[in-house]
Amino acid sequence: MLEIKIIERVKILEIEFIKELCRNKKIRWTNHIFVRLVQRGISMNDVTTAIINGEIIENYPDDYPYPSCLILGLTVNNKPLHVVCGTNGIELWLITAYYPNADMWSSDFKTRKE
């Protein structure tokens, strides 16, 4: 019964809840994100910094296995970074991170180009 309430609570993610999980180090780093960070030259510190100062720009409430979202934040060197993460209500699952491409995103990196 409790698990259902937790899942319902995070159907649409809120940035303050995500930031709280991140600050409290309730983070699950997936193998996929580690591979992508190495490929893209992004540090773990860049990811957590971007989450802490970021905002949700897209919500994916029906993602499997947990609802997820796309966060836009700034790295430690003030570069825009997109982070995809989800949560089961207990831990923050980090899925991938990338530097947004200006050809695919608006100038503020918040809206996808058509």
Image (cartoon, helix red, strand yellow):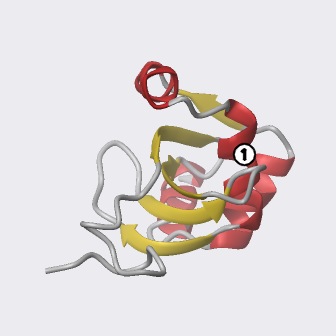
Above or below, 112 against 103 in this view is: below
Closest to the observer, 72 or 108: 108
Type of the residue with mark 1: Thr
Q: Residue furthest left?
A: 114
Element at label 1:
helix
Residue 47 percent coordinates (x, y): 65, 44
Residue 108 percent coordinates (x, y): 48, 81
What residue did someone put label 1 on?
A: 48
Above or below, 35 against 72 in this view is: above
Counting the numbered discs, the total is: 1
What residue sits 50% from the left and 49% below the top? 85
What residue sits 53% from the left and 47% below the top? 88
Residue 84 percent coordinates (x, y): 46, 51
The quadrant in which residue 17 appears is bottom right
What residue sits 58% from the left and 28% below the top? 29
Residue 32 percent coordinates (x, y): 40, 25
What residue sits 65% from the left and 41% below the top? 91
Few, some or many C-alpha atoms within 10 Å of disc 1 (few <14, some 14-19, many ≥20)? many
Left or right? Give the position of 78 relative to 63. Answer: right
Closest to the observer, 19 or 91: 19
Q: Quadrant of the C terminus?
A: bottom left
Above or below, 70 against 64 in this view is: below
Closest to the observer, 59 or 54: 54
